[in-house]
Image (cartoon, grey):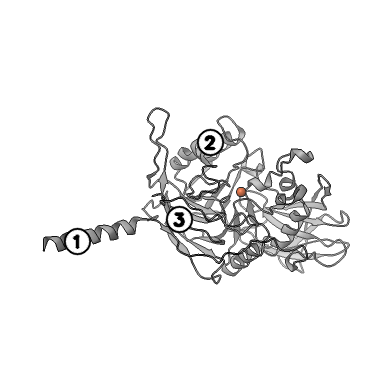
């Protein structure tokens, strides 16, 4: 009888332990090469018409979306740099002038790159916009984000490390099917630098490929290592040259001095973008800006505090192992003290979600260096699974660390649906399923308004 009771207790203990353990997904994707789409792929096709605007994309032009920056490229000549906009395709009576830029990268010369910030927009309103006057006019539309407020719902798409493979195309299609109002992009856009001489034509193909989403809703950019385009052997030593010429960010509105770290306030979320590839040590511009920025966060207006960066602080994959560690050591305590809700990262080409853990007790004297459960800590989500040419990172550390809640080596995207000041619904979708199938999901509660244990 006593033996049976002992067995029962043992079984219960095993069950409890299992309930507490994280999940290394047993899902095994079919093994196949991850190949870039060929240059003649339909998604890379240039729009018809002489000097037709191509590679159209938008991002926030100020901190809350009462300005929107429209960018595009004209291939043949500068053309007309005016954007007309208004509340219907027939009444685009407002207009703004673009700035024009070009750049050389070794033996490549870019097309004519236009950036135009539309200002004095109203929150939560659909606008139509057009450019290319004089030759080929193209018309698009977007809806500005709603005015920031504590219970304003909003749905973000979360994408990283996208590239331009057939898998990348699947990721974008899945995201389009699930729907979101803006994308938080955690870095590594085109992977043009994987080609000889960083073939910048692959920056052009990438921008034509994603136009179908980013011309209609803002994507917020984070700088990844594939944006560095540093190649001294061919004399290219200006960091982020193609990226900065092509992808503006609203950094000045955020009091930043560089485009690689900045913040925006969308609906009920305050989003801070950091650069893993700019200096962040004490006294550096990024360090100083972040120290001040955290003091500007107002959780009563924007309850959700979300941080984007490229190289993850918590990730249990053997690829890029510990690369984010120095930045974690520099900033983790600040983020825990600020009760950041979510930290999004990419870089590692797989999916992983953490529990609320922190590792901020270490100093050189006490030697404490174990991540511990901490309800003030953010959930770390690694969404570097966009499907680029470098393939999947399928080599997880064993055993699975206690801080990891779910991990899987598949391509996909995620969505974050903020409902109100206390609740947000997060789900991850793998590309090998139908777009609507949810492979991982969790209800997150807000660290400021409802700091319950939501990550187990
Ligand atoms: Fe990366």
Which element type, helix, strand or loop, lies under badge 1? helix
Question: Residue 31's spot in the image, x, y percent?
Answer: 57, 64
- Left or right: 180, with 111 as reference point: left
280 and 81: which is toward the camera: 280
Q: Mark 3 or mark 1: which is in front?
A: 1
Q: Residues within 10 Å of mark 1 (few under 14, many from 20)?
A: few
Question: Residue 365's spot in the image, x, y percent?
Answer: 39, 27
Q: CA distance from mark 2 to mark 3?
A: 24 Å
Q: Give the mark nearer the N terminus: 3 vs 1.
A: 1
Residue 421, numbered label: 3
Question: Residue 41's spot in the image, x, y percent?
Answer: 75, 67
For the N terminus, the image quarter is: bottom left
Q: Which residue is mark 2?
A: 291
Q: Give the mark nearer the N terminus: 2 vs 3.
A: 2
- Left or right: 202, with 379 as reference point: right
Which element type, helix, strand or loop, lies under badge 2? helix
Q: Give the mark nearer the N terminus: 1 vs 2.
A: 1
Q: Which residue is mark 1?
A: 7
- Mark yes or no: residue 219 visible: yes
């Amino acid at each position: 009888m006593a033996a049976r009771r002992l067995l029962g207790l043992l079984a219960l203990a095993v069950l409890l332990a299992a309930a507490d353990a994280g999940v290394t997904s047993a899902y095994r994707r079919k093994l196949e090469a991850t190949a870039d789409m060929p240059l003649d792929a339909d998604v890379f096709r240039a729009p018809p018409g002489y000097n037709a605007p191509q590679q159209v994309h938008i991002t926030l032009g100020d901190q809350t979306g009462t300005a929107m920056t429209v960018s595009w490229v004209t291939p043949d000549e500068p053309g007309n740099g005016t954007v007309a906009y208004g509340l219907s395709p027939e009444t685009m009576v407002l207009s703004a002038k673009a700035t024009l830029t070009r750049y050389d990268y070794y033996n490549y010369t870019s097309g004519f790159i236009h950036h135009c910030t539309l200002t004095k927009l109203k929150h939560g309103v659909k606008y139509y916009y057009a450019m290319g006057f004089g030759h080929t006019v193209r018309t698009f539309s977007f809806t500005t984000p709603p005015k920031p407020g504590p219970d304003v719902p909003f749905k973000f798409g979360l994408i990283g490390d996208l590239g331009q493979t057939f898998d990348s195309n699947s990721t974008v299609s899945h995201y389009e099917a699930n729907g979101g109002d803006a994308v938080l992009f955690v870095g590594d856009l085109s992977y043009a630098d994987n080609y000889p001489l960083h073939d910048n034509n692959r920056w052009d193909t990438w921008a034509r490929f994603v136009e179908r989403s980013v011309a209609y809703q803002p994507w917020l950019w984070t700088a990844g290592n594939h944006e560095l385009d540093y190649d001294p052997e061919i004399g290219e030593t200006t960091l982020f040259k193609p990226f900065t010429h092509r992808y503006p960010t609203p950094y000045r509105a955020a009091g930043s001095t560089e485009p690689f770290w900045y913040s925006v306030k969308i609906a009920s979320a305050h989003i801070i973008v950091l650069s893993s590839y700019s200096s962040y040590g004490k006294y550096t511009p990024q360090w100083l800006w972040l120290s001040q920025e955290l003091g500007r966060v107002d959780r009563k207006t924007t309850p959700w505090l979300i941080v984007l960066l490229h190289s993850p602080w918590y990730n249990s994959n053997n690829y890029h192992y510990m690369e984010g560690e120095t930045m974690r050591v520099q900033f983790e305590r600040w983020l825990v003290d600020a009760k950041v809700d979510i930290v999004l990262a990419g870089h590692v080409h797989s999916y992983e979600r953490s529990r609320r853990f922190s590792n901020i007790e270490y100093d050189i004297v006490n030697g404490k260096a174990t991540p511990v459960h901490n309800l003030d800590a953010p959930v770390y989500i690694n969404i570097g699974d966009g499907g680029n040419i470098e393939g999947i990172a399928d080599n997880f550390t064993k055993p699975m660390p206690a801080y990891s809640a779910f991990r899987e080596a598949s391509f996909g995207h995620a969505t974050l649906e903020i409902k109100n000041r206390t609740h947000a619904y997060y789900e991850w979708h793998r590309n090998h399923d139908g777009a609507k199938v949810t492979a991982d999901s969790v209800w997150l509660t807000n660290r400021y308004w409802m700091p319950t244990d939501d990550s187990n």
